[in-house]
Amino acid sequence: MIIEILIYGMIQFLVSQIVHIIIWRIFSPKAYPIWLPVIFIFTPVGFFIILHILVFSGLIGIDLNKALYLTIGSSLVMHLALSAMYIHMYPGIIFFSPSLELIKLLAEQNDRGLSIEEMDLPVLSEANTIGMRIDHLSNSGMIEKSVNTYILTPRGTFIARSFYIYRRMLGLPGIGRG
Amino acid sequence: MAEERLAEILKLTIALALAAPLFFIIHMIISWVFRFAKTDLTPFVGTFFSLIIGSIIIIIYVIFLLGPKLWETPLEASACLAFVFLTLTGFAYMYFATFAISEVSLHMHIMLMILISKKLSIDAIKIQYSKPHMLKERLKRLIDLGQVREKDNLYYLNGRILLYGSKIFDIWKILLGFSRKLNT
């Protein structure tokens, strides 16, 4: 049974990845914070619920016994863990990371060291750091422009406040070092 | 026997599903202990410790308490360990990334700055994100993670884990149809 759980979990994740790649190849959604959870989390969970409805309404004849329930449930937990990992990894894949750009720059120097003044990284320009992030936060409905300043939308306030409380619970300053 | 095995698999699944809250509780305990002890602990090091301690607790529970009842053959034992490893890795990465968002993400930093000051001008954001400030913060973090070393104000590459990781990201980017170059 544990073998089935492992295989079903991997198949679920693989199917979600294939759907994700196909959609992204057709058009790359800008609202990925909505699209990725829909593909990786809500669709498999919704499928699980629809399966129940079909079985209990007698439309399909599957014997939903305890063992099958547990196999599907356990494989879903594994799929959700892998999906959560991928969803968190995704921004690092599509956006450049200043830290990775620094690592790449130092790797290009072989054994020669670089001073801060010598670290010429065009990707750290204002447009690529602040500009890109502000555009992205605006497009995903987290912040909005009000005259010459930015304010949080209700959705942005909820998310920012959740992270603020999380950091305070860890005894850390409400805002990270950036 | 079959019923007993189902119960053990259920316990295993619940233990794995509770991995993320366990990481958080351990992280909280470690952070506050170090804070009360007035010992400086780099935020990322504290997070790593929490993930390692949490994973060890779950693995001990699986191997010593549930193990003998969960598998009968070496193949089942391997499948069980693969299931535990993949699920734990998934939740551990999720927890680590969530903490990293709160600590280093530019997006979250801008949102938290606006939350604290209610509204923020672009100029104020630009001052916070000056190039030297960003470089210094990132270099300090990379030194803490052992990926960069500093000698006589010169910075050298010290580890290649992040470099190899970035190459995998580049391949995945191409698979999704993005250019390898900076995505705007």
Image (spheres, rainbow, N blue to C red):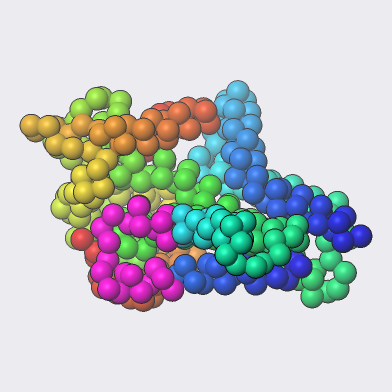
Report the residue at 30% width, 74% height from top.
Answer: A25
Q: Which residue is most to the right?
A: B1
Report the residue at 79% width, 71% height from top.
Answer: B76
Q: Is residue B64 visible?
A: no
Q: Height in image: A151 above or below A37? A: above
Overall secondary structure of the magenta section: helix
Report the residue at 65% width, 72% height from top.
Answer: A7
Q: Which residue is most to the front?
A: A58
Q: Is A36 in the magenta?
A: yes
Residue B179 in the image, given as x and y percentages of width and height = 26, 73
Q: Is residue B15 left or right of residue A19?
A: right
Q: Is residue B50 left or right of residue B74?
A: left
Q: Is residue A53 left or right of residue B169?
A: right
Q: Is residue B76 visible?
A: yes
Report the residue at 75% width, 66% height from top.
Answer: A2
Q: Quadrant of the C terminus of chain B?
A: bottom left
Q: Which residues are magenta?
A: A18-39
Q: Height in image: B73 above or below B132? A: below
Q: Is B58 in the magenta?
A: no
Residue B136 in the image, given as x and y percentages of width and height = 33, 46
Q: Quadrant of the N terminus of chain B?
A: bottom right
Q: Quadrant of residue B129?
A: top left
Residue A40 in the image, given as x and y percentages of width and height = 46, 60
Q: Height in image: B1 above or below B58? A: below
> In terms of depth relative to the viewer, which is nearer, A31 or A99?
A31
Residue B114 in the image, given as x and y percentages of width and height = 26, 31
Give the total number of marks visible in the rendering: 0
> In terms of depth relative to the viewer, which is nearer, B169 or B144?
B169
> In terms of depth relative to the viewer, which is nearer, A150 or A174?
A150
